[in-house]
Amino acid sequence: MTTHHQHLVYGYAQSHGCLAFADADTAAAEAAEIRALATAHTWGEARQVQMTQLWNPAGPDYHDPEDGYADDKPFDITKVGAVEGGTWPRMVTERAFTVLPQDLQDNHGKRQLTVHDGDYLEIPLDCEAELVAELRGRGYEVIRDDDLINLLDGFSLGSLAG
C-alpha cells in the first residue's frame, strides 16, 4: 500500500497544536518562496518574487501599484490581504489529506472544520511514534522538521522580515 508521496516531512504545527505532514519533495522549494516573499522590503520586490510552487499574494493580479502599492512603498507581508485572511499560505495541516494513506488518517487523526479555511486533519502529538513507525513500515522516508512545517504554515511570517 503506497502512494505518490514517498518522502514526507512532518512536525508540530504551532498554529494548530498538532502534527502536520507535507511532501518533502516540494516543501523546501515552497519554504524558499515563502521566505523570499516575507523578506521583500518593497512592494516592487514582493511583486518580483518568482513562484513555482505557490501563488504570489502580493502579485500585480492582487495589488495594483496604482492602488497605493507602488514599487517603492515599504512591504509588510503581514499586511497582505491573503495573509491577513489566513488563505496564504494554505494550512499545512490540511496536507495530511493528500499525503497520508486514508487508513492512517482515520486511525490517527480527526477531521476539524474551520469557518473560513476549510478542513484540516488534527493529529495529536502523542500519535507521533506509532504513526511514523507505520509510515516507515510502508516504505516512506519520514523526517521531522518543526521549523519547516511552521514556515509552510505561515507561522510568524512577520518575524522573517529583516
Image (cartoon, rainbow, N blue to C red):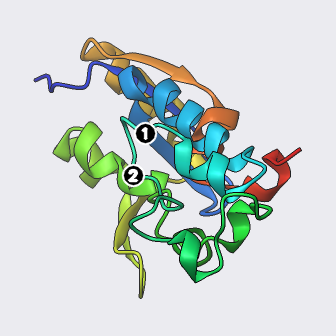
Horizontal side of residue 84 vs 63, given as left or right: right
Question: SS at mark 1?
Answer: loop
* Quadrant of the frame with the N terminus: top left
Q: Residue at x 53, y 30 (%)?
A: 129
Q: Is residue 104 visible?
A: yes
Amino acid type assigned to the residue bearing label 2 in the image:
Trp
Contact check, label 2 and label 1, Cβ < 8 Å: yes
Estimate the x, y position of residue 39 in percent, counting from the top left: 75, 44
Horizontal side of residue 20 vs 23, given as left or right: right
**Residue density around tag 1, few if under 14, some if 14–19, many if 20 or more, within 10 Å:** some
Q: Nearer the viewer, residue 105 or 67?
A: 67
Q: Nearer the viewer, residue 119 or 162?
A: 162
Q: Is residue 156 visible?
A: no
Query: Based on the displayed image, in which of its 4 quarters is residue 75 positioned?
Result: bottom right
* Quadrant of the frame with the C terminus: top right
Q: Residue at x 34, y 25 (%)?
A: 134
Q: Residue at x 58, y 40 (%)?
A: 149
Residue ID for mark 2: 55
Label 2 to label 1: alpha-carbon separation: 6 Å
Question: SS at mark 2?
Answer: loop
- Work out which residue is located at the far bottom of the displayed protein and give it: 115
Residue ID for mark 1: 51
Amino acid type assigned to the residue bearing label 1 in the image:
Met
